[in-house]
Amino acid sequence: MTNQDEDKIRKAFAAKDWNDIKAADSWQIFKIMSEFVEGFEKMSRIGPCVSIFGSARTKTSNPYYKLAEEIAFKLTREGYGVISGGGPGIMEAANKGAKAGGGKSVGLNIVLPFEQSSNLFVDNDKNINFDYFFVRKTIFLKYSQGFIAMPGGFGTLDELFEAITLIQTNKVAHFPIVLVGKKYWEGLLNWVKQTMLLEENNISEKDLELFKVVETADEAVSIINEFYSKYLLKPNF
């Protein structure tokens, strides 16, 4: 644990009176509201988009980087904009592909102390910065017409399972979720099927139909197109 981590813990547990807590919470509400307002106003003007998730650590030489770039390019050719987290790795690949395809390239960037900054392929007028992860996630979920999950880490899993949960519980519209890379997702999906479903009965067999697993860019784009040949494009909630 670093000194900075310890300072954060001490600050969190420092004695505060009710007025201090109330004042801080009240101002925080306005900050949260402002992020929602900016996100809603900008995204409502952009039009139909597909979100591409994945690791910030993926190098440009990685095949998944190239694949994410290809998927984004082909999505823009079909008339979709592309939303990413605005950072490096897979996010950069998604914005790069969207830019190359002449489509809308959106970045929902999270402000972090030492890590992420916006990549160079996000459209200047479509770069939105957030301090709060939950506000950013709400914008992703509200305005994405489909989710494409590339290989990633905890953040990717968080976004993926949040989307699946909201669809499963009928809190949002049933939009397509596509996992790219059968080998990468195989272990997780085996655990979902064997442990969650068969051993513990914590999900239903129908829940496995909430997402598709593919290998190629054409397969991913085809699933998005096939879904919206039947349904109207609109915000999810």
Image (cartoon, rainbow, N blue to C red):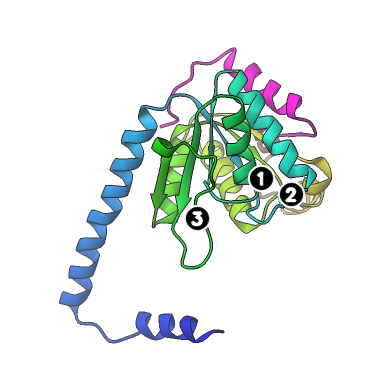
Residue placed at 47% from the left, 50% from the top?
A: 109
**Which mark lies nearer to you, 3 or 1?**
3
Q: Position of residue 236 (x, y in %)?
A: 45, 30
Q: Which residues are magenta?
A: 209-237
Answer whether residue 168 is visible to the viewer in this image: yes
- Is label 3 in a helix, a strand or a loop? loop
Answer whether residue 211 is visible to the viewer in this image: no
58 lies above or below 165: below
197 lies above or below 154: above
Q: Which part of the image, by quadrant, shows the C terminus?
A: top left
Q: Position of residue 60 (x, y in %)?
A: 72, 48
Q: Which residue is mark 1?
A: 203
Q: Which residue is mark 3?
A: 117
Disc number placed over residue 192 in the picture, else none: 2
Cβ atoms at labels 2 and 1 below 8 Å apart = yes
Say what amino acid the circle numbered 3 marks.
Ser
Residue placed at 75% from the left, 43% from the top?
A: 64
Cβ atoms at labels 3 and 2 below 8 Å apart = no
